[in-house]
Amino acid sequence: MERVHTLAIQATSDPRFIGEVERASGQQISHCYQCGNCSASCAYTYVYDYPANQIMRLVQLGQKDIVLTSKAIWLCAACQACTTRCPCNIDVAKVMESLRVLSRQEKKVSGRDIQLFYDEFLKLVKRFGRVFETGLLPLFGMKAKKPFTDMDLAPRVIRKGKLGLIPHKVKGRKHVEGIFERFEAYCSRREKDKG
């Protein structure tokens, strides 16, 4: 795992980044005083490249590239444990979500598989109105060139009724599809306006 060289931190600082994240998340990240409660309450800290409190500090220091390419922002389960325990009332989970959005917008997603998983997940939500897990896992596995990953779990999970073999019928599926279409049209207009 590659870490930032702390002595060269000013050379890579973007002082506008904290304002960008605060506007996107609606949170006052500048109020974070590094108590560490967010990292202590996170069940996934052990797999993060940077624990939640370090992500918050890196945002404060303007380390845009490091934060937006980190794996931690994608591993966050948005369980809200960090948010609940924050003495500054910062919604840390909301900050992590905003960082994921910024990472995609800036095309800085750290791994091809992360981008691929999210894209396939959203395609299925658009098509079925919610995620179809039984379709997502093999589809993702094939496109990621890991076709047999987690296949050994499928029979047990299906037997326990945790996964369906056909997609659930969702009321308002067309409305969900409409949300995606409006968003795609909005993005297309924004791109034309920029160009």
Image (cartoon, rainbow, N blue to C red):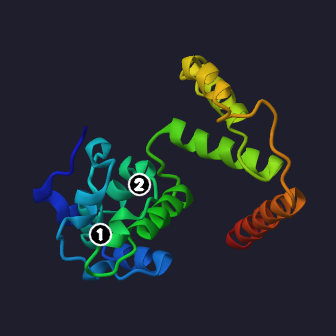
Give the label on residue 186, or none: none
Residue type at mark 1 is Gly
* Image location of residue 57, percent across then percent down: 24, 67
State which quarter of the image contains the C terminus: bottom right
Residue 165, quarter of picture: top right
Q: Is residue 178 above or below residue 150?
A: below
Q: What residue type is labelled 2?
A: Ile
The quarter of the displayed image where residue 147 is located: top right
Q: Is residue 71 among the parts visible in the rendering? A: yes
Which residue does the image show at 18% across and 70% down from the upper left? 34
Residue 126 image position (x, y, % from top left)? 78, 52
Q: Identify the image quadrant of the N terminus.
A: top left
Q: Image point 36% across, 63% down: which residue?
A: 81
Mark 1 vs mark 2: in front: 2
Q: How crowded is mark 1: few (under 14 residues within 10 Å), some or many (20 or more)?
A: many
Left or right placement of residue 36 versus residue 98 in this view: left
Residue closest to the far front:
160
Q: Do the residues labelled 1 and 2 touch (CB within 8 Å)?
A: no
Question: Can you tell which mark lies on residue 62?
Answer: 1
Residue 84 drawn at (x, y percent): 35, 71
The residue labelled by disc 2 is: 73
Instruction: Determine crowd level at label 2: few under 14, some 14-19, many 20+ residues with C-alpha closer than 10 A.
Output: many
Alpha carbon separation for disc pair 1 and 2: 16 Å
Residue at disc 2, secondary structure: helix
Q: Can residue 143 be seen in this view?
A: no
Residue situated in front as seen by the camera: 126 or 15: 126
Q: Where is residue 75 shown, x and y percent of the image?
A: 42, 48
Dot 1 falls on a residue whose secondary structure is loop
The outermost residue toward the left is 7
Taking the image as shown, residue 121 lies to the left or right of residue 79, namely right
Which residue is located at x 41 percent, y 54 percent? Answer: 73
Q: Compared to 183, does 138 lie above or below?
A: above
